[in-house]
Amino acid sequence: MTNEAAIRIVSFSTILVIMGIAETLFPKRNLDTSKARRWFSNLSIAALSTLIIRLGIPILPVSLAIFCAEKNIGLFNILLLPDWIEQVVSILLLDLIIYFQHVAFHKHRLLWRVHRMHHADLNIDASTGIRFHPIEIFLSTLIKLTAIILLGPPASAVIVFEILLNGCALFNHANLRLPVKLDALLRLIVVTPDMHRVHHSTDMKEANTNYGFNFPWWDRIFQTYKPQPELGHKHMHIGLNIFRTPEFIRISRMLTIPFI
């Protein structure tokens, strides 16, 4: 196991446990489906996706960043800017690419069919942050690797970005009740649970807003920001109207969603 993989696994596991405990102690919404079943299915899907990526794409993002640095491939390896500028700009650009990727998965029909599995969760909590179809994870990894080849970001920036992406996904999907003033302060620098929950509304006008995963600024810049759901967080409907039966909690049925 590489240091990168170890760092990511430890950070992911730690944040997942913290979010799981926090949302249990301070829940925002009452869950109407079995949390144990959902967590088992969502964690199993994440494990399956990880296995497929390891088998199908043998190179890790950090390893590719190191290779690009050695071969002078990518924008930052050509420009040779100060290290702190490369670090900050690399993280911002990688996050912007993930924002546009998310928009694309909503706007293009074939991509949306794959992305639907993420939105089909009948409740939203920390485990929803890792509920992505293996096809989506595979495509997302290819996009990320392409971005690394084009940008040539420092390997350290890639590690930081990967940890941020995983950690923020767990945080902003958490069924966590935050004080209103704290939420307003936090969403100046990070996507909060209340901000991202709007994105999981059954109302597609709301689901097509708040695409950001790490930083909240892109939604404001590109005018896809919606501060609150119309029905309020306690009464809004989560999920997709066409996948509301409990059978879609089963792993086998979750995997069929893109083909239905």
Image (cartoon, rainbow, N blue to C red):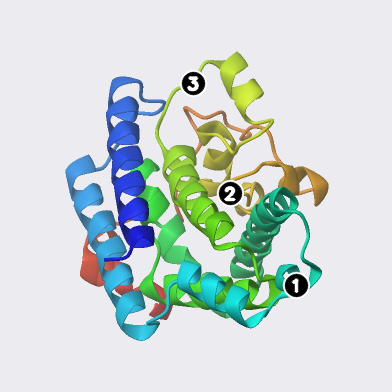
Residue 93 occupies which quadrant of the picture?
bottom right
Quadrant position of the N terminus in the picture: bottom left
Q: Mark 3 or mark 2, which is nearer to you?
A: 3
Residue type for callout 3: Leu
The label number, if any, that marks residue 203 in the structure image: 2
Mark 3 Cα shell of 10 Å, populated few (<14), some (14-19), many (≥20): some
Please indicate whether residue 165 sits to the left or right of residue 45 in the image.
right
- Disc 3 and disc 1: Cα gap in Å? 40 Å
As drawn, the label of residue 225 is: none
**Where the C terminus falls, by quadrant?**
bottom left
Dot 1 lies on which element?
A: helix
According to the image, label 1 marks what residue?
75
Give the labeled residue for mark 3.
178
First-in-chain label (3 vs 1): 1
The spot of residue 4 in percent (x, y) is 38, 60
**Res. 89 image quadrant:** bottom right
Residue 48 x/y as whole percent: 26, 70
Q: CA distance from mark 2 to mark 1?
A: 40 Å
